[in-house]
Amino acid sequence: MTANGVLQLVFYVVVLLVAAWPLGIFMARVYEGKPHFLSWLGGLERGLYRLAGVDPAGEMTWRQYAIAMLAFNLLGLVFLYGLQRIQHLLPLNPAADAIALVGLLAVARFFIALAGMDVGTAFGSLGARREMMVGFLAEPALLMVLFTASLISHSSSLTTIVETLAHREFVIYPSMAFAGVAFTMVSLAENARIPVDNPATHLELTMVHEAMILEYSGRHLAVIELASFVKLLLYVSIIACVFLPWGIAVSGQGFAAYLVGLAAYLVKLAAGGFLLAVFETAMAKMRVFRVSDFLGAALMLGLLATLLLFVSRVT
C-alpha cells in the first residue's frame, strides 16, 4: 500500500472515531423520542403525513382504499393528458429527447432507492444497493441502443426516430436487430424481471426490487407498484414503437389511421405481455453476481449495433 493509501485509511478511521460519539447520541435521542437539534423538522414531517393521509392509529377499509386508488389514477390521468396537450408550449420541450428519457429513468431509480433505504431495514438497504448496481450496468447499454436509433434517424428525438423508422422505405437494418436484443435485455433488468430478478419472490438472497418495498403496504405500496407498471409499459411501448414500428399513424392521416395505430399498439402490447410470461416460465433466475455478465453482453450488443451501422455506411 502506498503512503497516500495509508494516510487515507488513517484519516477515515480518525473521522469515524470522532463522529461515532455525537452521532450515536443523536441516533439514541431520535429512537427514544427525545428532543434533538433537528426536532424543528417535526412540524414539516407531520404536515407531510397529514397531506398523505397517514394516520398511525387508524386503519383503512377496503372502500377507502378503493376510493383512494381511483382518485389517484383519475388525477394522474388528467395530469398526464394535460401535459401531453401542452407539451409543445413547454420551454424545455426541444430537449425532451431519448437522452433526457434515460436521465429521467435514472432519477426515478434514485428515488425508489431512497424509498428502500428510508425504512431503515437491512433488506431495504440491500435492495437499494442492488437496484443501483443494476442501473449502473444497464445505463451504458441503453444509451448505446438509443445512439444506434439516433444515428439512423439523425435525431435523438423519440418522435423523429419513430417517424423515420415507420414511414420510410422498407430497409433491413442488422444493427437494429442487435440493438433490439440489447434493449430487451436491458428492459428485463430495469423492470426486475427474470432472469435478473424475480418479482414474485421474497427470498432474501435473490431479492432486488422486492427487497426495497418489503416494508411498504397500503396506498404507498400501491403507488410504488403503479410506478413499476408504468415503467414496464414504457419499455414495452419503446420496443413496439421503435423496433416494431409498423402500423403507427402520424399527424394528419385521419381518424381511421389513428384507430388502426391504436389497434396495432394494443396488439403489440398484448404480444409483449404474452412473450414475457412465456419467457419467465421457461427461464430460471440467475445469480446476482451473474447480472454483470448479462448486462455486459447487452452493452457489447449495443456497441456492435453502432459499429455495424458505421461499417455498413462506409462500405
Image (cartoon, rainbow, N blue to C red):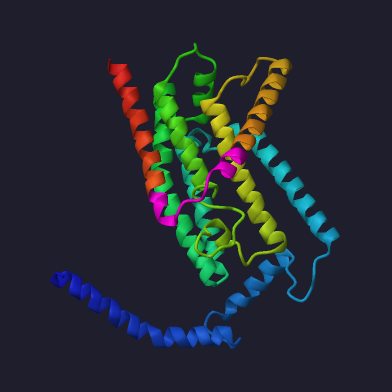
Query: In the figure, residue 255 lies in which quadrant?
Result: top right
- Residue 240 position, x and y percent, is 57, 29
Q: Is the magenta stretch mostly helix, strand or loop?
A: helix
Which residue appears at 44% of the width and 36% of the height?
182
**In this view of the protein, can residue 86 be seen by the observer?**
no
Where's residue 98, x and y in %? 48, 35
Report the magenta residues as a range. Answer: 276-292
Asked whether residue 11 is drawn in magenta, I would say no
Q: Front-most of 193 and 20?
A: 193
Front one among 256 and 197: 197
Residue 248, by quadrant, is: top right
Does 111 sit above or below residue 4?
Answer: above
Pick the quarter of the image with the N terminus.
bottom left
Picture coordinates of residue 239 (x, y %)?
A: 54, 32
In this view, 17 is above or below 188: below
User: Left or right: where does residue 277 sit relative to residue 13?
Assistant: right
- Residue that appears at 74% across and 51% down: 72
Residue 215 relative to residue 96: left or right: right
Q: Where is residue 133 in the image (x, y as percent from the top left)?
A: 42, 55
Which residue is depicted at the point 44% across and 26% down? 177
Q: Does the magenta stretch include residue 282?
A: yes
Eyeballing the image, is 51 above or below 9? above
